[in-house]
């Protein structure tokens, strides 16, 4: 009897996140927002990377990445736009630019 319920989950595939990379051009911050009691305030950062706009949700008021840096991230396309996943936005380290 329990085997009947497994069949419905077999075909479900979680959509994979898309990897992105580019130069951080601008950042616009909104917030703080509070969704419910007990939730810490969060900020929405609207970032422009290579001419495309993405939204990044963070607990920090400022984005610690300076403008002009090359960044890498994972994002999902939603009905509200492109959302960068939590803790996936970071600076790209290129070994050829280190000068060793």
Image (cartoon, helix red, strand yellow):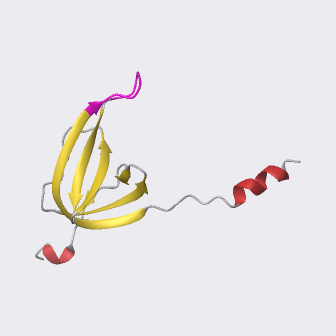
Which region shows up in magenta? 32-40
Along the viewing direction, whichever of 18 and 99 lies nearer the viewer = 18
Q: Is residue 35 left or right of residue 21?
A: right
Residue 90 quadrant: bottom left
Residue 74 appears at what percent x and percent y?
Answer: 37, 60
Give the residue at the far front of this rendering: 79
- Spot occupied by residue 23 in the image (x, y as percentages of width and height): 19, 65
Which image quarter is the C terminus in?
Answer: bottom left
For residue 87, say whether it is visible: yes
Q: Is residue 46 above or below residue 76?
A: above
Q: Position of residue 33 (x, y in %)?
A: 30, 31
Against 94, residue 59 (above or below) is: above
Q: Is residue 7 magenta?
A: no
Viewer-side residue, 34 vs 51: 51
Residue under the image location 74 percent in, 54 percent down:
8
Secondary structure mostly seen in magenta is: loop
Q: Is residue 63 left or right of residue 1?
A: left
* In the image, residue 37 lies in the stretch drawn in magenta: yes
Residue at image coords 39%, 29%: 35
């Amino acid at each position: 009897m329990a085997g009947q319920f497994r069949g419905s989950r077999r075909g479900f595939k979680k959509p994979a996140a898309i990897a992105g990379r580019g130069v951080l051009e601008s950042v616009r911050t909104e917030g703080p927002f509070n969704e419910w009691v007990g939730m810490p305030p969060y900020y929405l950062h609207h970032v422009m990377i290579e001419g495309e706009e993405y939204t990044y949700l963070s607990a920090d008021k400022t984005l610690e990445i300076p403008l002009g840096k090359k960044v890498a991230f994972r994002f999902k396309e939603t009905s509200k736009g492109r959302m960068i996943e939590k803790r996936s936005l970071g600076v790209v380290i290129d070994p050829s630019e280190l000068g060793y």
